[in-house]
Amino acid sequence: MVTFFIAFLVSLLVALVLTWRVRERALAWGWLDQVNSSRKVHVRPIPRLGGIGIVGGFFAPLCALFIVDSGVGDQFVSQTSLIVGLFVGGAIIAGLGFYDDLKGAGAKLKFSVQVAVALGLYALGFRIEVLANPFGAELTLGLLSLPLTVVWVVGVINALNLIDGLDGLAGGVAFFGVGTHFLLALMRGDVLLCLLMVSLAGAILGFLVFNFNPASIFMGDTGSMFLGFVLAAVSIKTSTKSGTAVALLVPVMALGLPIMDTLLAMVRRSLLGRPMFSADKEHIHHRLMSRLLLSHRTTVLVLYALCTLFMVTALALNFANSLQSALLLCGVGVVIMVLMRKLGYLDVRRMDAVQQTRHRNLELRSLVRSVTAAVRAAGSFQEVWNAVRPLSAGLSLSALELRLRRPHEDVNAGVVFESQHPDAGAEAALEVRLDVKEEEAALLGALRLVWRDGRAAIDRDEELALEVVADVVAERVGQLVALEAAEPQRIIALRR
């Protein structure tokens, strides 16, 4: 227990110091999460990359075991596959998150790296080979072990990433998962898993000092994906050492909230015709705030309580027989159904509206794909405008305006493209303006849209689609400006 306490204390202190230093450097260097999207909940720029503190806090006591002579250290050093899996895999995932926080990584790159890491874990022995069946005999997976292991690792990594929407939420959810695995490992006498969990718990708490509402720093993808990776890997070890009656059910229940939120997001986006990896404000924490009118901090505390329920259930499953496990799962299922109904997820009266929304969103996605493809192929400001113009007819606009300027030009300088619909109505105008600006770059212009059809606000899906278009326009205009500046250097005199 002394070793556990020292590991916890070291990880806590390292996370505290690292998070504080990263926050100060982020403020000085402008590494801030800007309020440049309607999806953001915060109202001012907040430093990001706080996940560095979590990563450093977790690895610090583990690295010390290579130096300090102890019985626990000897056991840890002897577990080569565990060390390689956590250290190498964790470093790769943290590096991917760091790159995404700084530069932005596309979905393809993220999933490629995550799948590669998951395959590496499988090769090192992190495998899900049995599925629990509380209503009968357990299921041996055989050849399905590999794909399910990959899906589990990638799924948990992204589940923690998706739940990271409110101050202190992802860190708190991960802490409850860590607590569950620590207690299970302690009851089984698994010293190494206990050590891993106390190290991660200390790192999370050290970060939460700065991240609980009101947060002064965010963990970013560096932290959320790293937490998901460690919990996914440890969950596999927990399931392989649990009784077959509850194999994998315990870690699934321990991470019940992020898994449930991810599944709801997948079903919701599929039904509504939205891109599977698009962001929205329909997650469980968003609905708690909008439908139950809860404050930011109260919402997080309510979700902590839900995590406590999942944690107690996971611990109970570890001791339950098949019948008791089935009864526990049914009870939790009833609680989940009541919660989803309260939050409006199971409102069958809206099915017609859902179908209409799906049809409109599929048309909107097609429009956005064609517009963004044309923008990326544009070779001049005029061609950018020609690529954007189909928005006018596709969104039934009364007026569409695109202002573009070079970074060195005055704010009122540049070029203005504008189109007016000749049959615009007489209703009061609704005007929406989006900045054309690459993140942390100079303002390159603005996209202005006007409706005169009586609407009081634009549709949420249209809002998200327009943000995508504005981002692509900013990216292409920035490339054109850079290419224009480089023209003199591109002319090379050839001499014989």
Image (tube, rainbow, N blue to C red):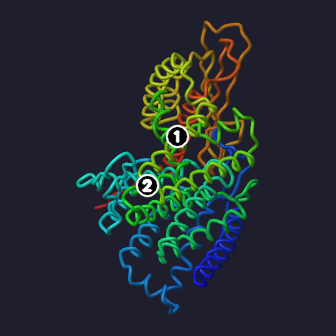
Residue occupied by mark 2: 321
Residue 127: where, in percent of width, then height? 33, 62
Residue 106 visible in the picture: no
Where residue 8 sits, quadrant-wise, is bottom right
Residue 430: where, in percent of width, then height? 70, 20
Up the image or down, 125 lies above or below 423; here it is below
- Could you tell me which secondary element the residue under label 2 belongs to? loop
Q: Residue at x 56, y 72 (%)?
A: 58
Residue occupied by mark 1: 333
Kindly indicate whether the residue at mark 2 contacts the one at mark 1 (C-beta within 8 angstroms).
no
Residue 22: where, in percent of width, then height? 66, 68
Q: Residue at x 48, y 41 (%)?
A: 263
Mark 1 is surrounded, within 10 Å at the Cα level, by few (under 14), some (14 to 19) or many (20 or more) other residues, namely few
The quadrant of the picture occupied by the N terminus is bottom right
Mark 2 is surrounded, within 10 Å at the Cα level, by few (under 14), some (14 to 19) or many (20 or more) other residues, namely some
Residue 380: where, in percent of width, then height? 49, 35
Up the image or down, 124 lies above or below 32; here it is below
User: Which mark, by number, is residue 357?
Assistant: none
